[in-house]
């Protein structure tokens, strides 16, 4: 990933590192850049403003301090051109950028597949939630209907009990009324 930064000069460590040497991968102030460009070994080094996007640092071979450009497929490590004829002689190699491209493609496909799986799983979960909600609605409807039926049965039973008690009460009143009428007749016939 590219870097954008206002850095300190890595040579004098006191001034602002306004320039970046692409070969040395270091920040320089203007004065140190001038001295750097005067050196025989570094007079052709390319600089760019540190305000520009700085390319990622190149990886170096730990054994030969050269840029790595190959992948040893046998050992699964990055190597430089000197390693090919040294410790990794006779091994299978591929270009590092080709391997990175293949790995990116493979990763992209894996991520895409995982996203599709996750999407399908989410759809299944949503369908399950909808089915669950419909089942809950059906259960609530059944409970409501059965509750209504039970209420109707209770209301009918209460009505029957009330009617029965009223009928019994009327029969008892009639009996009492007849008995009272009979007692009244006896009382009237006895007082005459």
Image (tube, rainbow, N blue to C red):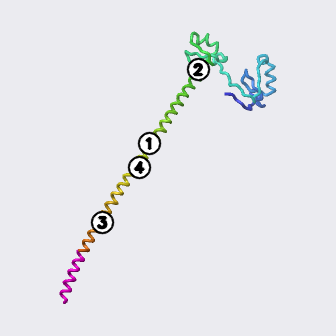
Distance of label 4 from label 2 (alpha carbons)? 58 Å
On the rendered image, what quadrant is the C terminus found in?
Answer: bottom left
| Above or below for 166 versus 133 | below
**Which quadrant holds residue 57?**
top right
Question: Is 139 covered by the magenta stretch?
Answer: no
Disc 4 designates what residue?
141
> Disc 2 versus disc 1: distance between alpha carbons?
44 Å
- Judged left or right of residue 184, residue 102 is right
Measured in 3D between alpha carbons, the distance from the residue under mark 3 to the one under mark 4, in whole angstroms, is 32 Å
Which of these two is toward me, 19 or 127?
A: 127
Tell whether label 1 touches label 2 (CB within 8 Å): no
In the picture of the structure, the residue carrying the numbered disc 1 is 132
How far apart are labels 1 and 3 at the CA level?
Answer: 46 Å
Q: Which residue is nearer to you in this view: 174 or 77?
A: 174
Query: Dot 3 corresponds to which residue?
Result: 163
Front residue of 70/41: it is 70
98 versus 15 height, above or below: above
Q: Residue at x 81, y 22 (%)?
A: 35
Q: Residues within 10 Å of mark 4 (few under 14, many from 20)?
A: few
The numbered mark, 4 or 1, whose residue comes first in the sequence reads 1
Nearer to us: label 2 or label 1: 1
Q: Which residue is mark 2?
A: 102
Count of numbered circles in the view = 4
């Amino acid at each position: 990933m590219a870097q954008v930064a206002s850095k300190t000069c890595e040579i004098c460590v006191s001034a602002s590192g306004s320039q970046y040497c692409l070969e040395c991968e270091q920040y320089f102030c203007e004065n140190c850049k001038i001295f750097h460009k005067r050196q025989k070994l570094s007079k052709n080094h390319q600089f760019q403003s540190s305000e520009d996007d700085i390319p990622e640092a190149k990886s170096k071979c730990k054994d030969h301090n050269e840029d790595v450009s190959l992948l040893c497929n046998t050992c699964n490590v990055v190597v430089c051109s000197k390693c090919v004829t040294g410790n990794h002689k006779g091994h299978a190699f591929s270009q590092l950028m080709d391997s990175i491209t293949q790995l990116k493609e493979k990763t992209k496909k894996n991520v895409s597949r995982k996203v599709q799986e996750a999407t399908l799983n989410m759809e299944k979960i949503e369908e399950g939630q909808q089915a669950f909600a419909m089942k809950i609605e059906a259960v609530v409807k059944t409970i409501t209907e059965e509750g209504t039926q039970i209420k109707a049965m209770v209301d009918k039973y209460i009505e029957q009990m009330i009617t029965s008690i009223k009928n019994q009460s009327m029969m008892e009143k009639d009996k009492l009324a007849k008995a009272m009428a009979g007692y009244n007749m006896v009382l009237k016939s006895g007082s005459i």
